[in-house]
Amino acid sequence: MQASDVQWSQTEKKAAQAAFDKAYEREIKALIEEVHERAGRISELDEIWRLHDFLSARRHDIDGKYDYSYSVLIFTFARLVKEGWLHLSELDGLEADKLTKVAALTHM
Amino acid sequence: MQASDVQWSQTEKKAAQAAFDKAYEREIKALIEEVHERAGRISELDEIWRLHDFLSARRHDIDGKYDYSYSVLIFTFARLVKEGWLHLSELDGLEADKLTKVAALTHM
């Protein structure tokens, strides 16, 4: 699959950006809630360092995941769908071949 | 000042351990409260990463600071007094020459 050669129409770009933003917003909202919840439970130093480890991993993950380059966007969407941050139906604005690729990748 | 040559009597060791533990307990308690407070205020991703940066710095600081080697204990106590985690009066069980050294170091 040569995702880097895929062309995106203006309409698709708009739909892609909206879906991307929606997934990002959901994941950040969930992260904030988890931080509130984890931090609220802390009563020992070890738990603080566990929160620190958790944040280190999430930061690395989120920094790498939300790459809006068109060359990797098919893969990004597949990952977001797989992780539950996006529904395939929310990518309806994309052309059929892209949707097929995203759907196929979510099964890998 | 050749702190590494300093001898510690059994009585002093007991007093030193108690003071060390007290400072540690206070600092950890304050840290837990600060984490609760900071995390509770979080409503944006940037604030999560600021909490992460804060915890990275505190972890590095605390890991390095609470060194109970007798060779550096005079310096450790001076730092803890300087930072407000310990009162000089709580080191009363130490011999006068050690107290003088700790007090002198807190002014450096």
Image (cartoon, coloured by chain):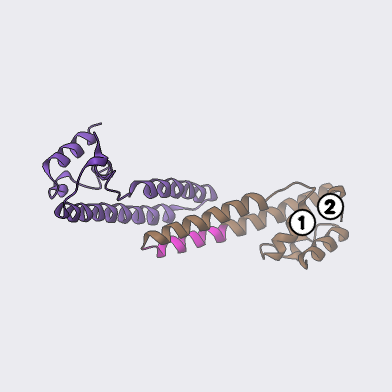
Chain colours: A brown, B purple
| Residue toward you, B27 or A83 | B27
Amino acid bearing label 2 = Ala
Residue B84 relative to residue A75: left or right: left
Question: Which residue is located at x 44 percent, y 47 percent?
Answer: B54
Instruction: Assign the C terminus of chain A to one quadrant of the image.
Output: bottom right
In the image, is residue A32 part of the stretch drawn in magenta? yes
**Which one is earlier in the sequence, the residue at label 2 or at label 1?**
2
Per the rendered image, the range of residues in magenta is: A29-43
Question: In the image, what residue occupies the spot 82% across and 65% down?
Answer: A104
Along the line of sight, the residue nearer the viewer: A45 or A85: A45
Q: Position of residue A23 (x, y in %)?
A: 66, 58
Q: Nearer the viewer, residue A56 or B64?
A: B64
Which quadrant holds residue A92?
Answer: bottom right
Q: Position of residue B71 (x, y in %)?
A: 28, 44
In this view, A3 is above or below A46: above
Q: Which mark is residue A75?
A: 1
> Overall secondary structure of the magenta stretch?
helix
Indicate the secondary structure of the residue bearing disc 1: helix
| Residue position marked by numbered label 2 in the rendering | A3
Q: Which mark is residue B3?
A: none
Q: CB under 8 Å between callouts 2 and 1? A: yes
Q: Are marks 2 and 1 on the same chain?
A: yes
Chain holding disc 2: A
Output the chain of dot 1: A
